[in-house]
Image (tube, helix red, strand yellow):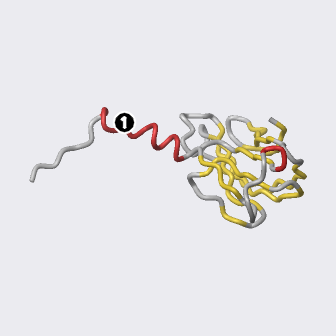
């Protein structure tokens, strides 16, 4: 049986699947799905970052592990505790931060980093 190495064409064909898989939204509340006006969405960077100089990865929400394929979470309103990793590409440094925030119904949020080319100094959650 002849085996072949993956070609660039094969790898490029798989790229959209990898990107979509890294952009999943994980629902982190019990019960039926909430309408958009009654839930909050929190986003971090997708795992496939296309060479971003700083990458933020959501690790946990309220002590619950977030899957590697998820870059966003859907939450009920209220106070939540987030564990976020901040990676600086140039230096390879990774720092971990705890962010606690009150989310409002219908809110859309994203994490942003305060970083230099060497180190990530802070992470905050802002309205989108």
User: Residue 65, relative to residue 115: is it above or below?
Assistant: below
Residue 104 drawn at (x, y percent): 89, 48
Please name whichever residue, 40 or 2, is drawn nearer the observer in this view of the structure.
Answer: 40
Count the numbered circles shown: 1
Front residue of 24/61: it is 24
> Is residue 65 rendered to the left or right of residue 5?
right
User: Which residue is at 63% across, 34% downward?
Assistant: 53
List x then y, in percent, for residue 84.
72, 53
Answer with left or right where residue 31 lies relative to residue 104. Answer: left
Q: Residue placed at 78% from the left, 38% from the top?
A: 114
The percent position of residue 115, horizontal first and vertical second, equals 75, 38
The image shows residue 8, relative to residue 83, as above or below, that is: above
Mark 1 closeness class: few <14, some 14–19, many ≥20 residues within 10 Å: few
**Residue for point 64% across, 47% down:** 71
Q: Is residue 14 left or right of residue 92?
A: left
Q: Is residue 9 above or below residue 96?
A: above
| Rendering coords of residue 28 (x, y %) | 72, 60
Relative placement, left or right, of 15 versus 59 is left
Q: Nearer the viewer, residue 81 or 13?
A: 13
**Foreground: 24 or 32?**
32
Q: Secondary structure at mark 1?
A: helix
Instruction: Pick the quarter of the image with the C terminus.
Output: top right
Q: Measuring 71% from the left and 66% from the top, which residue is drawn there?
A: 64
- The residue under label 1 is 13
Please say if 50 is above or below 100.
Answer: above
């Amino acid at each position: 049986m002849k085996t072949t190495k993956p070609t660039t064409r094969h790898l490029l064909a798989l790229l959209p699947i990898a990107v979509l898989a890294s952009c999943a939204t994980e629902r982190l509340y019990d019960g039926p799905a909430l309408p958009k006006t009654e839930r909050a969405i929190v986003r971090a960077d997708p795992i496939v970052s296309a060479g971003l100089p700083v990458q933020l990865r959501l690790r946990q929400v309220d002590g619950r592990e977030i899957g590697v394929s998820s870059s966003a979470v859907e939450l009920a309103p209220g106070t939540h505790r987030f564990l976020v990793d901040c990676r600086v590409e140039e230096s390879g440094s990774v720092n971990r931060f705890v962010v606690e925030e009150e989310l409002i119904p219908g809110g859309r949020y994203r994490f942003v980093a305060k970083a230099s080319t060497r180190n990530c100094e802070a992470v905050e959650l802002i309205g989108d």
